[in-house]
Amino acid sequence: MEKNQASLLLQQQLKHLCKNPVDGFSAGLVDESNVFQWSVSIMGPPDTLYEGGFFNAIMTFPEQYPNLPPTVRFTSEMWHPNVYSDGKVCISILHHPGDDPNGYELASERWTPVHTVETIMLSIISMLSSPNDESPANVEAAKEWRENRAGFRKKVSRCVRKSQEML
């Protein structure tokens, strides 16, 4: 039952995004037979280090969606304090609902079933604009962001160039 409800909700969200595209990203299914795995492309936000980049990611939804969050993993190279080295995005709204066992986040900052693909993607675009180096997924990127902005900029520029070459 849960899987059918999740499937219907995801189909509705995909249909809505196709009819009403949102600036900054595009989304579609990786495989037409699996509504639980989406391919997303994020345009690097204007006036950020990521401007001009086209970054691809896979969004994987659990059968318990919207009660549990999807995971988002960049398949394009990404250098960012809130992206693990394997590409997995680490932002509060993608963390399981409820209290943070580590005490870093309020329950209200974590996943709630009101989030949609659109709100997730807009949060990721916002993350690219303003990295959170307080609780980083990529410690090296966070350290470089804080201590060597020129080096950080250089690595991000390389990621942007690589993403453009993949078009």
Image: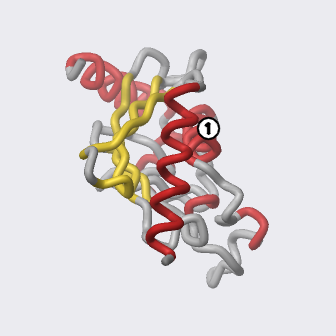
Q: What residue appears at the point 66 percent right and 78 percent down from the top-left corner?
A: 100
Residue marked by disc 1: 122
Place of residue 89 in the rendered image (x, y in percent of width and height, measured from the top left): 45, 53
The amino acid pointed to by label 1 is: Leu
Q: What residue appears at the point 66 percent right and 54 percent down from the top-left corner?
A: 115
Task: Kindly indicate the quadrant of the structure image that contains residue 139.
Answer: bottom left
Q: Is residue 137 left or right of residue 106?
A: left
Q: What residue appears at the point 63 percent right and 84 percent down from the top-left corner?
A: 101
In the depicted structure, whether residue 163 falls above or below residue 97: above
Q: Is residue 125 left or right of residue 159?
A: right
Could you tell me if residue 27 is visible in this image? yes
Place of residue 156 in the rendered image (x, y in percent of width and height, measured from the top left): 39, 29
Task: Kindly indicate the quadrant of the structure image that contains residue 54.
Answer: top left
| Viewer-side residue, 30 vs 89 | 30
| Viewer-side residue, 32 vs 106 | 32
In the depicted structure, whether residue 106 falls above or below residue 132: below
How many numbered marks appear? 1
Q: Quadrant of the C terminus?
A: top left
Place of residue 79 in the rendered image (x, y in percent of width and height, measured from the top left): 38, 40
| Viewer-side residue, 74 vs 161 | 74
In the depicted structure, whether residue 6 falls above or below residue 29: below
Could you tell me if residue 84 is visible in this image? no
Place of residue 33 in the rendered image (x, y in percent of width and height, measured from the top left): 26, 51
In the depicted structure, whether residue 12 falls above or below residue 26: below
Element class at badge 1? helix
Q: Residue furthest bottom?
A: 101
Q: What residue appears at the point 34 percent right and 47 percent down from the top-left corner?
A: 58
